[in-house]
Amino acid sequence: MKQTISLDQTHKIMVAKAMKFYRGSLQGMGKRLFDIAFNKVLEMGKDSVDLDGMEMIYVTQALNSYGKKLSSLKEYEGAACYRSLASHIEKTRISFQREHSPILKKKKAASAGTLPA
């Protein structure tokens, strides 16, 4: 299952910049999996991209990491923008996973205390 994330041109540039920065800190299999999400963002259509839960986590981590870098450079307004976008994507991911979680879809069986005698 995938969630469609809508990004205007400014947000798309922010995500691509943050992911490019964050990619340098990864290695091995983590980097390969990250690259799948990174390539989707780079090749996304006009204003939206379809991401699964893990890919949304990678985007959020990249945005927060870049925001932290900007904070260390005392660029607080820019950092706030990146962290705000990360928060928005994280809320979207949580909502998506709650809606599509196989664990939550299971019906609970009646317990002994609720069965009629």
Image (cartoon, grey):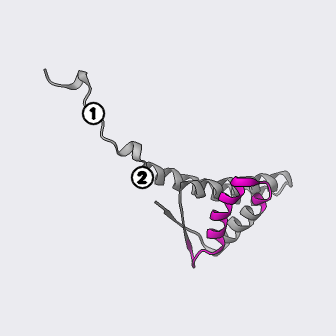
Residue 56's x, y, as percent?
A: 59, 57
What is the spatial separation of the Cα atoms under label 1 and label 2, in whole angstroms? 20 Å
Q: Residue sitting at 40 percent across and 42 percent down?
A: 103
Q: Residue sitting at 39 percent across and 43 percent down?
A: 104
Residue 100's x, y, as percent?
A: 42, 52
Q: Residue sitting at 53 percent across and 59 percent down?
A: 52
Q: Estimate how packed mark 1 is, as few (under 14), some (14 to 19) or many (20 or more) residues with alpha carbons within 10 Å.
A: few
Image mark for residue 40: none
Residue most toward the left? 117
Residue 102's x, y, as percent?
A: 40, 47
Query: Magenta stretch mostly in which secondary structure?
Result: helix
Image mark for residue 100: 2
Vertical relation: 18 (above or below) 98: below
Say which residue label 1 marks.
Answer: 109
Residue most toward the right? 73
Query: Is 25 contained in the magenta span?
Result: yes
Label 2's element?
helix
**Amino acid at pointer 1:** Ala
Which of the 4 quarters of the picture holds residue 33?
A: bottom right
Label 1's element?
loop
Residue 10's x, y, as percent?
A: 67, 72
Residue most toward the front? 28
Front residue of 34 and 95: 34
Query: Is 36 contained in the magenta span?
Result: yes
Residue most toward the bottom? 46
**Amino acid at pointer 2:** His
Q: Earlier in the sequence, mark 1 or mark 2?
A: 2
Bounds of the magenta segment:
21-48
Q: Are marks 1 and 2 in contact (CB under 8 Å)?
A: no
Front residue of 78 and 22: 22
Q: Residue sitting at 79 percent across and 54 percent down?
A: 25
Front residue of 10 and 31: 31
